[in-house]
Structures are given as structure tokens and as C-alpha cells.
Amino acid sequence: MPSERSRPEWVRELAPVDPAALSRSVLVSDKVEEFVAQVGTGSAGWAVELGQAMAAHIIAEVPELDVDGIVQMVRDGCEVVALEAVAALAGFKDFTVEAAPEVLLGPAEVVSRGVGVEHILRSIQVGHSMVMERVLDAAERYLPPQQRFSEIRRITARLFGIADRLASEMARAYGDAHEAWVASSAAARMEVVQQILRGGPVPADRAVRLLGYDLTRQHVALVGWSDERVPAGASRLEETVANLLESAGCSSALVIPVGGRRVWAWGSRIRRLPVVPDRLRQPMDGVRVAVGVPAAGIRGFVTSHQQASEVAQLGMLTSGERWLFDYGELDLITMLGSRLDRARKFVIRELGALAGPEEATTVLRTTLKCYLDVERSLSAAAENLHVARNTVAYRVQRAEQLRGRVVGVRRMQLQAALALAEELGAMVLGDADRRAG
């Protein structure tokens, strides 16, 4: 029988199906690097891939969690849980759910959105079942028959321990968040807003009294969030969105905190639509804002918020320097990127080897996108990119070679794929030698 020390060795042989899985981790880089140092790149990529699959499975099985803000926390939480499961099986005991506060931030957001604790506990059950299935399949693949029984007992005990502890922690955190939420003034306002967003009947006088905001005016909706992994940014977010609404010419504003690092906001004018200026000073580090299309009346209040929420989901997937996400500018990318699995296949299919993650390939994509954006003018592209005209011509030719088709073939799809690659980066890119049918 193998010693306790030798048992975890099979875990270090794990490898993801997608070689680029690790680059799509949603966690902070130092935590991922710490994990890689302990269990190896292959096992880390396998865990990240498992976390992503678990999140998709939970959202499919518990649709109550498939809403803006919560779905991102599900992705964060699933990846942390998958990493802890692999760490525990590999004998690396210092990586725990409690060490990753993004998992336990969820209840504050869930409570403020009216989602019950039963859905949280159901998600843990669904996720645990999937992890058990994937891990046991891997153990059967990597372990000789004479070692499987004892290892399965160890796996079962470790994974049940994680699930039980997580359920207890989440139930406690949910209870604390619910108690704090009920006592807050934001609870009554959120109840009215949720009813309006669901299309329910809300007497105008009651809405104005509770919200202090006139729904008959011209509105623009914002969703602000913090990239920080601690629930400490609500006041800063409220200040940022209030300043943005003022810059848009709004004479009235409604700002509601949603959880610890997100706010919903609306601003209105009486006669003209509010317009967020194109050029704005960037707010403090870690703050990002999504903007819906301005519109009038209650319908505009709802649709602008829906658009801001959708483009916020796109913003949460990006890792670039952009901090303001305007649905009016990014509507096509928002719609195309709503299903990451399909978006990734589309990008790789359209770009071919031009979808590679290398820096040189990124330069070619950037040049080709600029060239197409200026209606295939070499001179205009060269001016925008601050390079020679011949350099643009060479890069475009090289990009066509990697893609395997000239730019005139499926041009609309090509531009969409380039835009997705620019906004989502590694989330939709693959190795240069991979293809999708």
C-alpha cells in the first residue's frame, strides 16, 4: 500500500484539455502563482478548467444565480473551490477557501438581489457532485487498480470536508448579510427598484417617495464595481458614479449599493437625454463603470439598466486598461461575448493562427483591426499606429497569411473576431496551432 506521502503524486500528473486554461484564471495572479509553485502548471490548469466547468454547470442547474454580479462571483468561487480541492488532494494544505475572500463576498450581493440561501446551498451541492465525478474519473485514469480503493476513500473524505465547511461558512455569511441588509435604508429602495425592473406595477407616488427619484424623466443607467477582492469600495464607487452622472448633465441621481463592491445608479434630466462625455478623467485604481444607452420614462429606466448590466459582464472579463464600458459603443461585442465558449470557438475559427497569444501575433491583430476600422487605408492606419505605411502593409499581409484568408473574405466576421480578441484577450484566444471546426 502506498504511503500517505506518495498518494498525492498522481494529482500532479493532471493536465487541462485546453493548454491555455491557466491563462484564463479569474483570480489574482499572486494567488495563482503560489498555487502553481506547489502543485505544478498542469494540475493548476486542470483545476482552473474544472472551476470554469463547475461554474457553468451551477448556473445551468441553479438559474436564480445567473444574474449580473452574482454570476461573476460564482465563477470566482468555483475556481477557488476547485483549486482548494486539488491542493488538498496534492497535500498542499495552506490554500483554502477562507484565504480567498472573493468566495465569501457573495452573500452580500445575493441578499441585496433577493436570492434565497437555499439557492446558495443548492449550488454547493451541485458543484460538489461535479467535482467528485471529475476527480474520481481522474483517479481511475491515473492510479493502478490496487491503489484506487484507499485513494477513493481519501478523496471522498477530503472533498466532503471542503463542501461541509463551505456550506457552513456560506450559511453564516448569508445570515449576517441578511441581518445587515434588512436594517439598511437601501433595502426598501432596492425592493422598489427590483419590482420596477421586473415589470411589476409600482404606484408612481410610492416610487418617488421611497426612491426620491422621478421615473418620468430622461434616464441613463450606470453599474459601477471595484476590482478589489475586499468589500471596502462602496463609498468610493458611489462617489465615482455620482461624479459621472453630474458630468452627463444629470440634475437628479439615484445610487444604490449592491453588496460590498458594486453599485447601481441612474441619473436623469427633464428635457434632454443625459450624455456621458467621451473623454473623462480615470477614477481611482480598481474602479470600473458600465453605461447603458440613455432613454426616457420607466421603460428607459429599465432598458438602460439592462444594457449597463450586460456590458458590465463584459467589463468583468477584460483585463486591459479600459475602465468605462459604454453599451452604445460595445453593444455588438457584448452580445457576441455573452457565451464565452461560443465566442472562443468563433474567434479561433475566424482568425486561425492569428488567434495565437504571442506578443508578435497581438501586434498583427491590432494592426489589422486598425486597418479595417479606417476602411483599409494604409496611410490612415499608419498615422493612427505611429508606424510607417510599409510596416502596416507588411503586417496586414502577414496577418492574412496566418489567418489563411485575405481580409475581404468574411470581413464582418473578421472584424467581430478581432474586436472580441482585443476586448477579451486570453479569454477567447488559443494556442497558435489550435483550430476549431
Image (cartoon, helix red, strand yellow):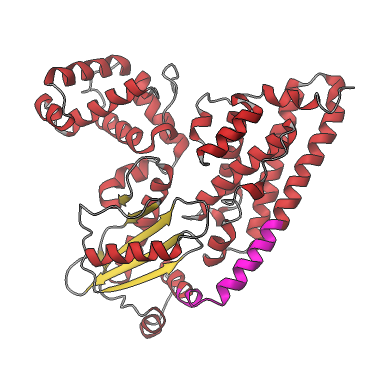
Q: Is residue 384 above or below residue 249?
A: above
Q: Examine the structure image and report whether residue 134 is included in the region drawn in magenta.
A: no
- Label count reads 0
Q: Quadrant of residue 320?
A: top left
Q: Is residue 82 visible?
A: yes
Q: Is residue 427 above or below residue 277?
A: above
State left or right for residue 351 relative to residue 105: left
Assign the magenta stretch its main secondary structure: helix
Furthest residue toward right: 1
Residue drawn where x is 59% and y is 60% of the image? 107
Decide which of 402, 389 is in the foreground and name it. 389
Q: Position of residue 303 (x, y in %)?
A: 33, 61
Furthest residue toward left: 379
Decide which of 190, 241 is in the foreground and name it. 241
State left or right for residue 383 relative to residue 171: left
Q: Examine the structure image and report whether residue 183 is included in the region drawn in magenta.
A: yes
Q: Is residue 140 above or below residue 74?
A: above
Q: Is residue 303 visible?
A: no
Q: Position of residue 416 (x, y in %)?
A: 30, 34
Q: Position of residue 55 (x, y in %)?
A: 58, 44
User: In this picture, which residue range is highlighted in magenta?
Assistant: 169-189
Quadrant where the N terminus sits is top right
State left or right for residue 424 relative to residue 107: left
Quadrant where the C terminus sits is top left
Q: Quadrant of residue 199?
A: bottom left
Q: Position of residue 223 (x, y in %)?
A: 38, 59
Q: Quadrant of residue 436?
A: top left
